[in-house]
Amino acid sequence: EIVLTQSPGTLSLSPGERATLSCRASQSVSSSYLAWYQQKPGQAPRLLIYGASSRATGIPDRFSGSGSGTDFTLTISRLEPEDFAVYYCQQYGSSRGTFGQGTKLEIK
Amino acid sequence: EVQLVESGGVVVQPGGSLRLSCAASGFTFDDYAMHWVRQAPGKGLEWVSLISWDGGSTYYADSVKGRFTISRDNSKNSLYLQMNSLRAEDTALYYCARSERLSSYFDYWGQGTLVTVSS
């Protein structure tokens, strides 16, 4: 089973700053089957990025994904107040869509 | 509009059983694989189970294998999770989610139904 490790656990930034979130896999993720989700308190997760770098429908272009193999990154170019949330990466190359433990992005 | 609405979550005693349902609308249900994902209070996301579009293939997390059974009724646009031998550690918000294929991202999620296992 592929284990995903996200870092940092918590990221404290201010609106307007750039956020860089990391997701590292214990083995190579096939065909870049890596997704990112955003979850706000009391809400279901929302798909942001799939295929490591493709934005989901309706996702602003300040969100971007990159990486391949075992190292992946979610970048938010300029933070808006609504971006402060918990972010999860997920690999879906196997039939078990395992998630990382999450990165909490909080307002500094 | 795509909608997934979970139901069936209640407080149940350890060792008890429960069946969760997920009603789908706004899309062709049998075009999609379906998943259950859970989130314990204050914790992260844990994938639980997956069923193919026709119900012919099912997969489970090791933590629930042998205790939970996923099923679907395409005539009713509904997904189910039969949960037996429940444990305290099964306490969580249970989400249903859809994916285009067995190995695909989850593009729509329901709002979840809360299962509490407690005496």
Image (spheres, coloured by chain):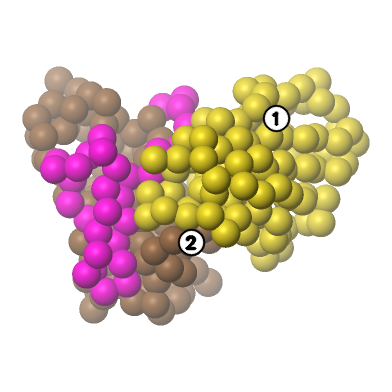
Chain colours: A yellow, B brown
* Residue A70 x, y percent position in the rendering: 61, 41
Q: Which mark is residue B106?
A: none
Q: Please tell me the numbered disc located at residue A105.
A: 1
The residue drawn where x is 23% and y is 24% is B88
| Residue beneath the point at 32% across and 56% down | B50
Q: Numbered disc 2: what chain? A: B
Residue range of the region highlighted in magenta in the rendering: B41-70
Q: For residue A18, what is the image quadrant?
A: top right
Residue A49 visible, this angle: yes
Kind of element beneath mark 2: loop
The answer to whether marks 2 and 1 mark residues whose Cβ atoms lie closer than 8 Å is no
Residue situated furthest right in the rendering? A16
Q: Which residue is pictured at 67% across the width and 43% down the height?
A: A72
Of B96 and B106, the residue lying toward us: B106
Q: What kind of residue is marked 2?
A: Ser
Quadrant where the C terminus of chain B lies?
top left
Chain holding disc 1: A
Q: Quadrant of residue A87?
A: top right
| Nearer the observer, A32 or A59 | A32
Q: Is residue B95 visible?
A: no
Is residue B64 located in the magenta-colored stretch of the structure? Answer: yes
Labels 2 and 1 in the same subunit: no
* Quadrant in the picture for residue B93: top left
In this rendering, which labeled residue sits more in front, label 2 or label 1? Answer: 2
Circle 2: is it few (<14), some (14-19), or many (20+) Cα within 10 Å? Answer: many
Between the residue at mark 2 and the residue at mark 1, the CA separation in whole angstroms equals 26 Å
Q: Which residue is mark 2?
A: B104
- Estimate the x, y position of residue B5 in percent, counting from the top left: 38, 58
The residue lying at 87 percent from left, 41 percent from top is A78
Report if residue B31 lies within the magenta region: no
